Amino acid sequence: MARTKTNKNQVRQNALNDIDDMETDQMRELLKLNYKIKPKFKSKKQKELSDLIKDNRITFVTGAPGTGKSFIALKTGLELLKEKSANIGDMLLTTPVVEISRSIGSLPGDLDTKISQYFQHFYDNMSKIIDSKTLKFLKETEIINDKIVNFIRGSTFGKTDDVGNSVGTYCVLDEGQNLYISEMKAYISRLGEGSKMVILGDIEQCDLKLRKNEKNGLQDAIERFKNIEGIGFFHFDEDDIVRDPFLIEIMKRYE
């Protein structure tokens, strides 16, 4: 079933018309200079992760829920979109469509509506980082886009500008533990020139039905790519939880 197509040019034009009929490139430069990233890092380790992402082409991030994995990945991506020297032109949000343990059955609406549920946590996080008007513009002009893993074949993450120079895409994959090895390979092989990938997950919360001794795609990749320059690894443990201190004790009881 093909994902519903929208008139992208019309959506882009409507967004631009809302902001003084400015051209796309002019508006993007204005956004790079003006939009404000509101929250600061909540811990030293969050700052360390942000620096690691900026220093590497691919960064694998694992750890317990509530440590800020997605939040820091998105905050760093928005910072790189702002920084002209980073040469990042857009952001792609990706996730596998895997339900937690039990099926919830068919969701209402068309395919776009069904899939949007899997990306809501990304946008909830970003709404805490930048104002709603900026987020709306970035989405409508597809500077920020989303795509499930099933739809990435044939894509290359990255673009070229009007004179043929490479412009990178900042890619965030969440729930990496719910990819099979072949799916992780397909995702990573999409990396284009100048692009970055941040691959997030919690190996302990895999929802795949794996055979005995079979590894999920995240676990396999972390072991496979050790000691390769340009690939970084970062792990949060329960003591790094920032969502609610009460959650620290709860998660320790699951160990």
Image (spheres, grey):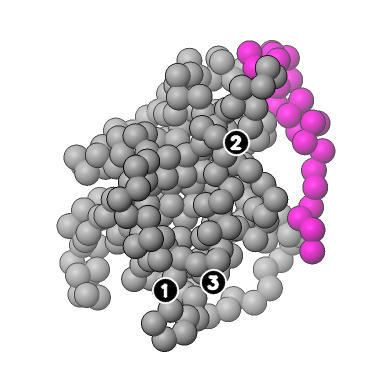
Label 3 packing within 10 angstroms: few (<14), some (14-19), many (20+): few
Residue at which label 3 appears: 99
Secondary structure at numbered mark 1: loop
Kindly identify which residue carries mark 1: 215
Q: Earlier in the sequence, mark 1 or mark 2?
A: 2
Q: Tell me the SS state at disc 3.
A: loop
Q: Earlier in the sequence, mark 2 or mark 3?
A: 3
- The residue under the point 26% across, 37% down is 47
- Marks 2 and 3: which is nearer the front? 2
- Residue type, numbered disc 2: Gly
The reply to whether residue 151 is in sight is yes
Disc 2 versus disc 3: distance between alpha carbons? 29 Å
Name the foreground residue: 69 vs 209. 209
User: In percent of the image, x 47 and y 80: which residue is there?
Assistant: 210
Give left or right: position of 100 versus 25: left
Q: Is residue 235 left or right of residue 106?
A: left
Nearest the camera: 214 or 51?
214
Circle 1: residue type: Lys
Q: Residue at x 51, y 43 (%)?
A: 171
Q: Are marks 1 and 3 in contact (CB under 8 Å)?
A: no
Residues shaded magenta: 1-26
| 192 lies above or below 23 | below
Between 209 and 57, which is closer to the camera in this rendering? 57
